[in-house]
Image: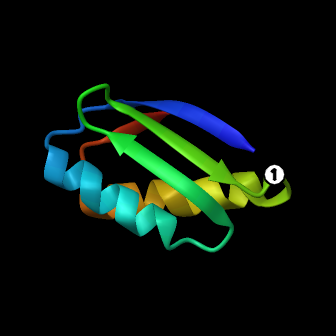
Amino acid sequence: MKKKFKLQDLDCANCAAKMEEAIKKISGVNDAVVSFMTQKMTIEADEEDFDEIMEQVKAVCAKVEPDCKILL
């Protein structure tokens, strides 16, 4: 399952790269793309665990960029 999310207050490209790298390490995530330029995030993950995976994604993003919000 692939879903796209809008990001708010992502401040730098380096943070986007760190978020993308950390999200790809989450169990169940097949692919992730975080774009600083478009302020969007695409997550491809197992459908049955998607909600649980998104909770982990939110935690990772908050750790890397505390001001960034994922608009669900």
Which residue bears the numbered disc 1? 47
How far from the left and from the top, in percent, is residue 71?
A: 48, 30
Task: Write the residue at 63% across / 61% down.
Answer: 30
Q: Secondary structure at mark 1?
A: helix
Task: Write the residue at 37% across / 65% down.
Answer: 21
Specify the quadrant that holds the N terminus: top right
Can residue 32 be seen from the camera position used here? yes
Determine which quarter of the picture holds residue 6: top left
Could you say which is closer to the camera, residue 15 or residue 55? 15
58 with respect to 14 (left or right): right
1 with respect to 43 (left or right): right
19 with respect to 29 (left or right): left
Residue type marked 1: Glu
Q: Is residue 16 above or below residue 64?
A: above
How far from the left and from the top, in percent, is residue 17?
A: 27, 55
Determine which quarter of the picture holds residue 27: bottom right
Specify the quadrant that holds the C terminus: top right
How far from the left and from the top, in percent, is residue 41?
A: 45, 39
Task: Write the residue at 21% across / 53% down.
Answer: 15
